[in-house]
Amino acid sequence: MAARNKARKRAFQILFEADQRGESVQTVLTDWLRHARTDDRQPPVGEYTMELVEGYAQYADRIDDLIATYSVGWTLDRMPAVDRNIIRLGAYELVWVDETPDAVVIDEAVQLAKEFSTDESPSFVNGLLGRFKDLKPSLRRD
């Protein structure tokens, strides 16, 4: 598995865990870092994973607003938690990380949905992130 693919998967897991625990992503990231230092069985948290989690945290409110605005027929609360967090991560990387091609961001998010969510989720994730890609210039504000 490529390094960035692993980083995205771990970042998604941190966002998902934070969502389930009702904690901030920074708190869960700190927990993961501590566990990686003290337990040899825990995988290390790479630099890109930290960048993704911290970047998402910086824009979390804006990202949730975008998801609420453009996810037709789904409120954030009704959306499956896995999908919600895959889209959060993908939205951050798509809108605010210029180094990664848009198609790669969307494809990686769809792959996470295939691995962790329902049969309908990949098309939902693809459609919503595709909408964000089309609107990207107008979405990017702090």
Image (spheres, helix red, strand yellow):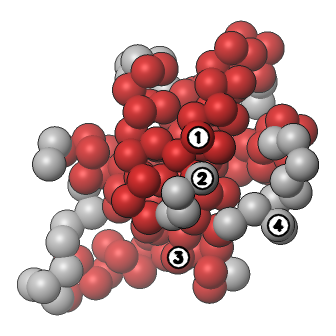
Element on which disc 1 rests: helix
* N-terminal-most mark, 1 or 3: 3
**Mark 1 against mark 3, which lies toward the viewer?**
1
Taking the spot 65% from the left edge, 68% from the top edge, the residue there is 81
Taking the spot 28% from the left edge, 84% from the top edge, the residue there is 35
Element on which disc 3 rests: helix
Rate crowding at label 3 as few (under 14), some (14 to 19) or many (20 or more) other CA atoms within 10 Å. some
Element on which disc 2 rests: loop
**Which picture quadrant has residue 108?**
top left
Rate crowding at label 1 as few (under 14), some (14 to 19) or many (20 or more) other CA atoms within 10 Å. few
* Proximity of marks 3 and 2: CB atoms separated by less than 8 Å: no
Q: Which residue is mark 1?
A: 123
* N-terminal-most mark, 4 or 1: 4
Give the Cα separation between the discs numbered 3 and 2. 22 Å
**Mark 4 against mark 1, which lies toward the viewer?**
1
Q: Which residue is mark 3?
A: 17
- Residue in the foreground of this view, choosing between 111 and 41: 111
Taking the spot 62% from the left edge, 85% from the top edge, the residue there is 21
**Which picture quadrant has residue 19?**
bottom right
Q: Give the amino acid at mark 3.
A: Glu
- Residue in the foreground of this view, choosing between 113 and 118: 118
Using the image, determine if residue 66 lies above or below residue 89: above
**Mark 4 against mark 3, which lies toward the viewer?**
4
* Proximity of marks 2 and 1: CB atoms separated by less than 8 Å: yes
Give the Cα separation between the discs numbered 1 and 3. 23 Å
Q: Where does the C terminus fall, quadrant-wise?
A: top right
